[in-house]
Amino acid sequence: MDIDRVLRDLAAAGALPIVLELGLIILVTLLALAFAERGLDHMIRTLLEREKFEGTAQELSAIELQKRRDTLSGLGAGAVRAIILAIAFLMALRALRLDIGPAIAGLGIVGLAVGLGAQNLVRDYVAGTFILIENQFAKGDVVRLADVTGTVEDLSLRRTTLRDLDGTVHSVPNGLIGVASNLTRFWARVNIEVTVKHGTDLEAATALVDRCGREMAADPAWARRVLEPARVDRVSGLSAAGVTLQVLGSVRAADRWAASGEIRRRVATAFAEQGIELA
């Protein structure tokens, strides 16, 4: 086929400018897609790297960071791609000298319908994005979300799946999470109360509780789990039942419940041996 002859025929028919304009639109669209995806990937990588070194994502493994980066990149790339292609489609209609008014009106109506019908879905995805970027919690953490407490078994941009102590599985949409309480982040406080009867020698009781805390911290089974030995911090209450001693200590976050039970057991045993009665 004679290329020059085809070009002359297109020019004679007035179609050459349209073909060139369409070609330019296609070229610009391809470039925009490539640069947008690269820019988005760089932005997400920068955010996650900053969280890794300055924020709460320091304990995440490289595999977990990569998984979160891929999830966010996939979602963002899909949204950016849809916007660029929609703009390119409208520009192509205009290049073909077609009336784009109905197309814009149609897209507006569709966008309004989708926005009204899927606003909760969009809210869930936006909230999930920030949960991943800020590393508010991860799989395996024990968290309290929307009045539900449990272990995170699955985490996506759409929802978080928790399993509570009874084994019940709860699916919480991320958009409903107003406050996320992570119970297993780095360290936790042992915070228990010991109530003794009126007339008890408080100095002796306090010394005994403190000794139990030191012995627990020195125990090889607990030495690496206890960060600060449990001790009596103050007298926190007086009641008809007796005098309440507030016992505080610090342990690794995942051991908070086991440590509280262990110090209670040691205190109960020591009190029984010394004849100190609990209220």
Image (spheres, grey):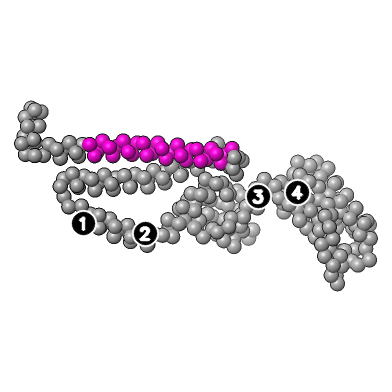
Could you tell me how far apart the alpha carbons at marks 2 and 1 are, in whole angstroms?
19 Å
Measured as percent of width and height from the top left, residue 245 is found at 84, 60
| N-terminal label among 3 and 4 | 3
Instruction: Identify whether 24 is placed above or below 133.
Output: above
Could you tell me how far apart the alpha carbons at marks 3 and 1 are, in whole angstroms?
55 Å
Question: Mark 1, residues whose alpha carbon is within 10 Å: few (<14), some, or many (≥20)?
Answer: few
Horizontal side, residue 43 vs residue 188: left or right? left
Q: Main secondary structure of the magenta part?
A: helix
Could you tell me how far apart the alpha carbons at marks 3 and 2 are, in whole angstroms?
37 Å
Marks 2 and 1 close (CB-CB < 8 Å): no
Horizontal side, residue 55 vs residue 123: left or right? right
Measured as percent of width and height from the top left, residue 104 is found at 25, 54
Amino acid on which the number 1 mark rests in the picture: Pro
Marks 4 and 1 close (CB-CB < 8 Å): no
Amino acid on which the number 4 mark rests in the picture: Ser
Does the magenta portion include 37? yes
**Mark number displayed over residue 233:** none
Which of label 4 and label 1 is nearer to you?
A: 1
| N-terminal label among 2 and 4 | 2
**Mark number displayed over residue 115:** 2
**Mark number displayed over residue 102:** 1
| N-terminal label among 2 and 1 | 1
Q: Which residue shows up at 20% across the image and 39% down it?
A: 22
Amino acid on which the number 2 mark rests in the picture: Gly
Report which residue position mark 4 lands on.
250
Horizontal side, residue 268 vs residue 114: left or right? right
Q: Which residue shows up at 59% across the image and 40% down it?
A: 54
Marks 3 and 4 close (CB-CB < 8 Å): no
